[in-house]
Image (cartoon, rainbow, N blue to C red):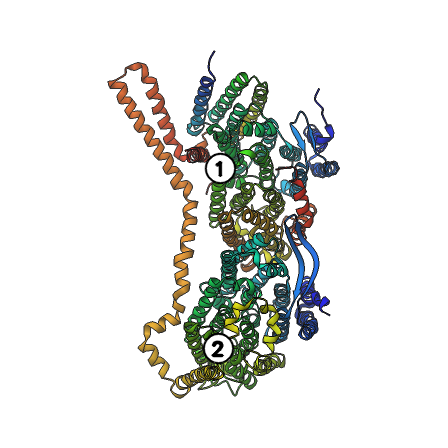
Amino acid sequence: MPSVTLTAILPEIILTALACIFLVAEPFVPKEKKEWMGYFSIGALICSGLSLFTLWGRNITTFSGMITLDNYAIFFKGLFLVVSMLAILISVRYIKIEEINFGEYYGLILFATVGMMFMSSAADLLTIYISLELMSFSFYILTAFMKRDMRSREAGIKYFLTGAFTSGLILYGIAFLYGLTGATDLGSISAYLSQHNLNSSPMLFVAIVLLVAGFGFKIAVVPFHMWAPDVYEGAPTTVTAFLSAGSKIAAFSAMLRIFMVGLGSSYDSWWQLLWLLSVLTMTLGNITALVQTNFKRLMAYSSIAHAGYILLGFIVASRIGMAAVLIYSVAYAVMTLGAFTMVILLCRQNSRGDQISDFKGLARTHPAVAGSFVIFALSLVGIPPTAGFIGKLFLFNAAIQGSFYWLAIIGILNSTVSLYYYFKVVMVMYVQEPQDVAPLSFSPTLTVALCVMSFMTLFLGLYPEPLIRAAVQSVQFFL
Amino acid sequence: MVEYAWLVPVFPAIGALINGLFGKKYLRDQSHIIAVTAVMASLFISIIVFADIALNPIAHEIKLFEWIVSDNFSAYVGLLIDPLTAIMIMVVTGVGLLIHIYSIGYMHGDEGYYRFFTYLNLFMFFMLILVMGGNYLLMFVGWEGVGLCSYLLIGFWYQKKSASDAGRKAFIVNRIGDAGFILGIFLIFGSFGTLDYSFVFANTHLINTKIATIITLCLFIGAMGKSAQIPLYVWLPDAMEGPTPVSALIHAATMVTAGVYMVVRSNILFSMAPFSLEVVAVVGAITAIFAASIGLVQTDIKKVLAYSTVSQLGYMFLACGVGAYVSGVFHLFTHAFFKGLLFLGAGSVIHALSGEQDIRKMGALARKIPATYKTFLIGTIAIAGIPPLAGFWSKDEILTSAFAGGHYLIWAIGLATALMTSFYMFRLLFLTFYGSSRVDHEVEHHIHESPHNMTVPLMILAGFSLLIGMVVGFPPESGWIHRFLSSVVGSAGGEVHEGAGHHLSLGLELGLMALSIGVALSGLALAYSFYIKNPELPKRLAARVQGLHQALYNKYWVDEIYSVVIVQPILMISQFLWTFDQWVVDGLVNASGWITILESKISEMFDIYVVDGTVNGVSDTLDFGARGLRRLQTGAIQNYMLAMGLGIAILTVIFIF
Amino acid sequence: MIPLSHFLILSAIIFTIGIVGVLTRRNAILILLSIELMLNAVNINLVAFSHYLQSITGQIFVFFIITVAAAEAAMGLAIIILIFRGKAFLNVDEINLLKG
């Protein structure tokens, strides 16, 4: 009888229980009380966070090695809880405006969060696959959640079909990896590969390419990125925000574990692949973003470019590189959510608010909102003193430490290019005359979320010490 | 008292915070009280710190708190107060205070009054962080911060399209430089394991000449962006769209000299890399003469001064490049005063003429605005390099160092630039204040001298321009400033001093001095004969050498060239990638469709001629597939999946074989 | 005894047929079926490996894949019905509102 430590998955149990209750209780909650389900979700997320907090520093492997709860997992789980909380805070009013005010919405967000959390602690290809699908399925439904909106439906089917196709690819890769090593848990795979000197076998390489394609799809790496702009544009904006922050980072967390633990010994056979993809991704993402007129699409390309930066940390494959991935993930989550919040604010009865021209004169009518966007933009470009700068500092520094000079140069040039399109939006806000005087879609919860995100973006830039320490401690179990 | 130096940047930060939070609602047209008080407090502390350092010129390190500390990375939020910092904070707070006071009058009645002072204070904060920081990271924070403020202040009148465009241009060009700077910082960290000046400069044995060259070249790229050197100078002339006090403070006296400060601060690294020094000297010299030549024919009073600034910054880099770091700082110091003065004077002229900036529509203003005229005259003589005013001492030192170091070509370029400088500055003076009035009629009635809060700063700056060169720089090469800064550049090792501590005979030195005075005076004489004695001459000359005149007048078409060579291609690539979906992917799909059709045709032939009906199925399938593939061209989702499939195939092929 | 390579080749062929189906079919339901084909190719692979490696893990994995695939199909059909209600057709190449 293998030992099972239930406390290791207590945070997920709490969320799953509440999400199941939501699905059952949904019909009995009157329409105008639905937002209470949102508040309950936040309560559950906080409880989950508290139970997670007590696990910090312990290194538990349980469920026959399927689940590993180390600091690395806890770091990401905490981040997912925060992201999910912020996503719910910005949703409460938005889903009323879009008339998708159903309890399932919150339930699905919780399920997606559970999926992400399991992804970061999954130590076996089986658990990685299942948690990946749990997250993806929730997102497929959430993307198509605006049933009456043609764009949302279209985004839903596009995301679903491409996503299902990708999971076929991942599974084929997993099958090869299993066939090669006879195991599905990452530790045994790694041990087998180095023992039998299989680190340069063609079959391994096919498996790696397929896995990269599968995860590359989730994190939107060129050329597996093409779904992202369409889905980001069509999905409800809150879902887009959650998708770009949560889903991408969750995929990174699982991918990092696979590549560092499972395939760490065959580093030589994959770093060039990721090098190429990283360069392609950041360059194409940034350059394509230059000509966008829809803000959500612009952010989609921007998030593609950011995926390219984060891959830098994979290629370096050192402790500094991994810590940099963790730090950048936090910065990226906060600033991306913040940028999407702008669209949510601008979404009113008569406008979708996702065109760049909708930002006209925002600085004149709402200086505080415009100011917080400037903070997010600075952070997205990577200008101090913001979280984005700290993230880039660690990533590029890691690249230089690992002697990847060209990669660092390309990354730095790319972030120089990215300035242009973020500040195109800033210029529209500050230079042009306001055209629409309809009030912004403010709500108390959204204000709280916006304040938290602006504060965190600045605070992590000014005093990054706690974040860095946590990130460094989180990667100590690796390598 | 040096321990309290951290207060210097804190005051402007508080000022910016108060004005930013309460300016719009409560302070409005009283915002300057907070802003000026903050800078005054800063100046007060700066003077105390300066006095302390002057009595005891050693470096003090103040560590405030740990910003980033990890296994192999450390950065303190800490200050380094040494003689170089002391001089810089005096320039920043001193000139800064005068410009703040001047702005009270200049910006009076502007609807963004509080916003202006908020940005100005914020700028002071970042500039002080830049010069006081004890490591490269803090310098970078300040560096980006001043860039941001500059961007906000250039685009201050954002209703003007040209102003907001100029702001964006400044920011983008600066980012190109910053890319180099960041890389340099990371390389320093990679080599030394820290970014603290004290450690880096004390442990230069950790790197060899090659790495030092790469690091310093990266740093210099940053300096080129910030200090407007060729080819990254294009933003500075455009930056004149901002309010004039901004041009004076940011684009003449302080921010643009940050690049020079950085080079001098890193002089120990630069001295290890002779090649980098050569690059610095050459870029500086070319920029100096290039910008000066453009300045010869410009007709916008602020543009002339802007090109003059670019040219003078080139001088400073020239000095650094030949190893005369102290002379570079000396020129930075004097330039801050006289160029600040000239810009504020220009502002006063513009103010008097209700916004007119074209010198062809000025003239004969000497008697109408006497205070502005007199101070502007002093500034002009100072920059032209006529003794005993400030510019002479610093410029002469730079030229002498270049000559003594054996850089004769660079020396000659410097001398030619001095001639041009003297010429275009007196041209500006004569066209503005002498001759006959060409002012528009309706403007003429309103000509008035500026209020006291504008003229008093002018007079103070004029006083400094008059005396400061002599006070700190006499006797040349061994004046007070040399002794004061010796600890900053002294530890660089002997070989650098071949430029600075040269061995010219007294006679030769005096001869060089006489030559530079002669050059300055001939510039004056030329300008006099062109614009006072014989006003028709310039036009005839311009007609005679029309091509050259056009080239100069259009600033060698650099903006246009950049647009064609850099901006357009980027936009085109971007457009191309954008239409990738519609063209390339569809094209690929079509092509694969055609190939399959071809195949199916061939197999049909096989079918008919070789094999009989049993294989019909294969052919049908292929044909069917071909039709299916052909239809694919409109299926967007499938295009995406096809791209993925092709991606996997290509990657596998590349990496397996 | 049938060698392992036969199974692998079979699975590769089925997988390729699945991919080609996904790329060429216009009807969303047929695309979904092609994806199922891909998943079953993977299942064959896993079972074959499991048998030849004498390790049970692969077969357990197959159970999970079958279960997840069922859920996937259910959800896919739901989304497809959503599209069908709006447009009354299922051709994916006519779903191109979002592009650029």
Foreground residue among B248 and B106:
B248
Q: Quadrant of residue B124?
A: bottom right
Would residue C2 be seen by someone viewing this image from the given angle?
A: yes
Foreground residue among A215 and C68:
A215
Q: Are marks 2 and 1 in contact (CB under 8 Å)?
A: no
Task: Classify B419 as above or below B560.
Answer: below
Q: Secondary structure at mark 1?
A: loop
> Which amino acid type corresponds to the residue marked 1 in the rendered image?
Phe
Residue A224 is labelled as: 1
Neighbor class of circle 2 (other Cα within 10 Å; few <14, some 14-19, many 20+) is many
> Where residue A84 sits: x, y (%)?
66, 39
> Which amino acid type corresponds to the residue marked 2 in the rendered image?
Thr
Total number of numbered discs in the rendering: 2
> Where residue B509 sits: x, y (%)?
48, 82
Q: Quadrant of residue A57?
A: top right
Foreground residue among A205 and A458:
A205
Q: Is residue B286 left or right of residue B66?
A: left
Q: Quadrant of residue A365?
A: bottom right
Q: Which residue is mark 2?
A: B400
> Where residue B598 sits: x, y (%)?
30, 28
Neighbor class of circle 1 (other Cα within 10 Å; few <14, some 14-19, many 20+) is many
Task: Classify A9 as above or below B415.
Answer: above
Nearest-to-viewer mark from 2 and 1: 2
- Callouts 2 and 1 in the same chain: no
Q: Secondary structure at mark 2?
A: helix
Task: Classify B514 as above or below A5.
Answer: below
Would residue A145 be seen by someone viewing this image from the given angle?
A: no
Q: Chain under label 1?
A: A
Mark 2–mark 1 distance (CA, rounded to whole Å): 62 Å
Residue furthest toward the top? C1
Q: Chain under label 2?
A: B
Q: Is residue B69 left or right of residue C26?
A: right
